[in-house]
Image (cartoon, helix red, strand yellow):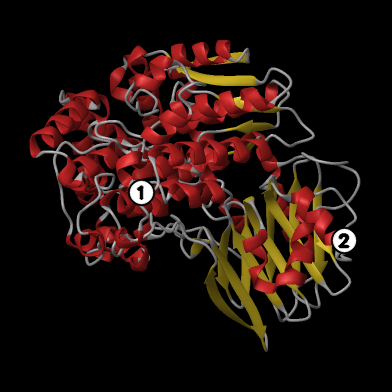
Amino acid sequence: MSGITGYFKPEGLSRNTKKNLELMLYSLKHRGDDGSYQYINEEQGIAIGHQYLHINGDPESVSPIFVDKQGIISTANGRFYDAKKQRTKLLFEGYELVSKNDNELVVPLYQKYGLQFVEHLRGEFAISLFDSQRKRLILARDRFGVKPLFYHITNGTIYWGSEIKALLAHPQITPQFEGKGLLHQLMHTMSSGSSAFQDIHAVKPGYMLIIDANENTLQISEKKYWDLEFPKQEDRDLSLSAQHHIDNTREQLLDAVAVRMEADQDVAAYLSGGIDSCAILGMASSLSQKSLSAFTISFDDDSYDESAIAREMAATVHAKHTQLILTADDLYGDNYAKTLWHAERTFYNTLGVAKKLMSRRVREAGCKIALTGEGSDELFGGYPSFKRDMLRYGLGTGVSAEESLSFQKLMNESNKLFTGAILSDEILSHPAMEDVCGFTPSWLQPWMKTLDIARPLLHDNLINELADYDPIQQIAASFDSTQLTGRHVLDKAQYTWCKTMLECQILNWGGDRVDMANAMESRPPFLDHFVAEMAVHIPPHLRINGNTEKWVLREAMKHIIPETLYKREKFAFMAPPGHTDPRKMQGLQSLLRKYMSEETVREAKIFDYDRLQQFMNNYKVDTDPVSLTRKDALINHILGLHILWHHFIA
């Protein structure tokens, strides 16, 4: 793990290239402080940088930027879990390898397979590869977007980096917000490949960007090499038994955990009180000859705290357990602002702040690697919104209308705490989503309501600019319709979530960006593509069985997780919102005073000051818990935009 950056200008680079590349690398130093490496060829117009975090092998042995005799230069941020097998096979075939660094595999695999080289990589990665003979640059990103990779094109030059701040560090790039991007931030839902910044894009998960130089002109194309492909209902094999899927789930997950346990460093585990992290710790402990270290976030609000189950799980597997109890003082103030600097996008809840503090504690304990549970809900049907869609539209003829309604009532009661943010308090619809899905997924509905509140608060300039822009329509248009046609309701809900919220939220301020803020490498076994390719074939009624979400996973992990957890309904992992505690409200108000004075709001020109003040005044007297939860989320986004403006633009 590390940070990569660079730029390509076919007509050639200036003498300032080394200095500019150093500025870009310095902005990524938090991602790895074990060395800073550069490759520059001014004549060919290529500059590549790598800020290194040492995990495997001898840190002094070789640069993580690899150059072969044919003029192919590559570096990567990430981990390839089949590296030993791949390295041995390539050596047998006569390829020259000189290090133990996983990244060295990229060049010989490209030589062997051409553009199909990424299909032979297992893991989480962002890659930059320059083929000097073809004058071709390739930027590739892993299948789910665990590792970030951004780019900007201007004046015949393409710039890239693991984080947006690396691009903004180059003196030729002027940071500006983009109106559409701001609106998506406020409604919490972004489309794949986008950002809040003008003309700065993300390489889409499962894609590579191919940049060819033709007479000093950049010719750019996208190539999709992987997708989360659920079978059409008519093609789904329903003859396999439930036990087959249970056994297959257990086998694939064990393998995914096992390959992620391979490291020259101690491997720790994040441990909430949910099935996902408990299952990961249980499997990892069974695969290890020594006790693992497990780290748990705990909140000073019993309604949002799952630490009791985490402690039980840690004791069961004899893990060395660290519990991090977080209060308002931890979740707000400087920690809040610094988390936004790392995430480069807003968040609706201070969970991202909590996870950044967790990664810091892991590093302080001497660990550079932690296994995490991201991806389980996405693949096995764990979110309350998925269950709502399944219960409303997807149960089929096997369940009566009375049973379906009874399940829905039970679900609504058990998820009251999250209504307004994770779940909508009413059923909403949008024609663009109806067109592509046949329904409007429940995960999107609360943010549609947030959008209705947020849009009128914008500055008049933005309201005019965005008068004809429909962000829901844009989100719907971003999906590959061929992956939705003929699929089950649950498949559609999971697919659309993975193409939006997983990449832009869960794996951002809930994953890489807050982990690598402290140069801590997180490894999510559930997002192994072999696990994903197995999970899509699990029939919907076994992912959500009646009123039980993640049924197959529960059964597969039944004997290694606490019985209490096996029987319990999914509990969304989030930090207590600001309105739940006077101390948190004070912390939030302090940040609002610091970053959102009247002078600042008027200068930033994101919002109309008078309309914003009226909204804030209404918030202070609101007593409806659903309305407050929704407004809490929106206030976090509003505040976050002003802090991002302070960090990157002002």
The spot of residue 393 in percent (x, y) is: 18, 47
- On the rendered structure, is 537 left or right of 283? left
Quadrant for the N terminus in the image: top right
Quarter of the figure with residue 601: top left
Height in image: 313 above or below 533?
above
Q: Residues within 10 Å of mark 2 (few under 14, many from 20)?
A: few
Q: Mark 1 or mark 2: which is in front?
A: 2
Residue 133 as seen in the image, left or right of residue 329: right
522 sits left or right of 430 in the view: right
Measure the C-alpha gap from mark 1 to mark 2.
42 Å
Residue shown at 50% from the left, 61% from the top: 204
Which numbered dot is residue 92? 2
Which residue sits at x=37%, y=15%? Answer: 583
- Residues tagged 1 and 2 counted as in contact (Cβ below 8 A): no
Sequence order check: which comes first, mark 1 or mark 2?
A: 2
- Residue situated in front as seen by the camera: 316 or 189: 316
User: Which is nearer the eye, 300 or 595?
Assistant: 300
The amino acid on which the numbered mark 2 sits, given as a three-letter code, is: Phe
Does any portion of residue 16 appear in the rendered image?
no
Residue 560 in the image: x percent, y percent? 52, 21
The amino acid sitting under disc 1 is Gln
Q: Position of residue 283 (x, y in %)?
A: 59, 28
Extreme-left residue of the structure: 402
Q: For this rendering, which residue is in front, 2 or 236?
A: 236
**Considering only vertical position in the picture, is 252 above or below 572?**
below
Q: In this view of the protein, can residue 431 be seen by the observer?
A: yes
In the image, is 231 to the left or to the right of 199? Answer: left
Residue 234 vs 125, above or below: the answer is below
Q: Secondary structure at mark 1?
A: helix
Q: Which residue is mark 1?
A: 494
